[in-house]
Image: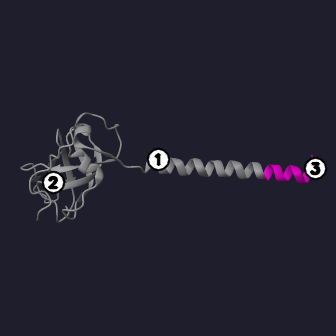
Amino acid sequence: MTPTRRRRLMLVGLLLVGLSAATALMLTAFSENLLYFYAPSEVAAGEVPPDTRFRVGGIVKSGSVSRAEDGLTVRFVLEDCTAGVPVRYKGILPDLFREGQGIVAYGRLDGEGRFIADEVLAKHDENYMPKEVADSLQTEDGQSCMPAGMGTM
């Protein structure tokens, strides 16, 4: 093998190793940033992997909202047709947040099965609801369990 061919072969080999390393780093970063969606009934059933950040969506249960004296910490129950999950959020809630409202929360479970939210998003009008949340608010036979008046201001 001539020195020129050997250099080309080394260059091609180094390029392949570099491309493989870049692809591996990209896939690792991508998988770490995925946010899976779970319904409250799936969270209550223990289907969520531990130490995972995920989204949960449903309806804020009527009568479940309580605010701490610091003015920022809010506790409520997020429910679907079959189960509810206790949620704790510290921060400023969206203006549209209220009991009976559809929301999506981002966060993770603590050791006691409570969902600790980093971010809470309320739906912005009656014509929009994320598909995942709408699907979680249907029973197995396809009937909707959304509260009456859902989406009215």
Percent across and percent down for residue 74 are: 15, 54
Mark 3 Cα within 10 Å, few/some/many (few <14, many 20+)?
Answer: few
Secondary structure under the numbered disc 3 in the rendered image = loop
State the extent of the magenta-drawn residues as a range: 1-11
Q: Nearer the viewer, residue 47 or 133?
A: 133
Total tally of numbered discs in the picture: 3
Q: Residue at x 20, y 44 (%)?
A: 138
Quadrant placement of the C terminus: bottom left
N-term mark: 3 or 1 = 3
Q: Which residue is mark 1?
A: 31
Secondary structure under the numbered disc 2 in the rendered image = strand
Determine the CA span between mark 3 and mark 2.
73 Å
Q: Which residue is mark 2?
A: 74
Query: Given contact means CB atoms under 8 Å apart, are the residues at marks 3 and 2 in contact?
Result: no
Percent across and percent down for residue 63 are: 6, 49
What amino acid is at disc 2?
Val
Mark 1 Cα within 10 Å, few/some/many (few <14, many 20+)?
Answer: few
Was residue 71 drawn as part of the magenta stretch in this picture? Answer: no
Determine the CA span between mark 1 and mark 2.
31 Å
Q: Which residue is mark 3?
A: 2
| Residue 113 in view of the camera | no
Q: Nearer the viewer, residue 74 or 27?
A: 27
What amino acid is at disc 3?
Thr
Determine the CA span between mark 3 and mark 1.
44 Å
Depth-wise, is mark 3 or mark 2 nearer the camera? 3
Mark 2 Cα within 10 Å, few/some/many (few <14, many 20+)?
Answer: some
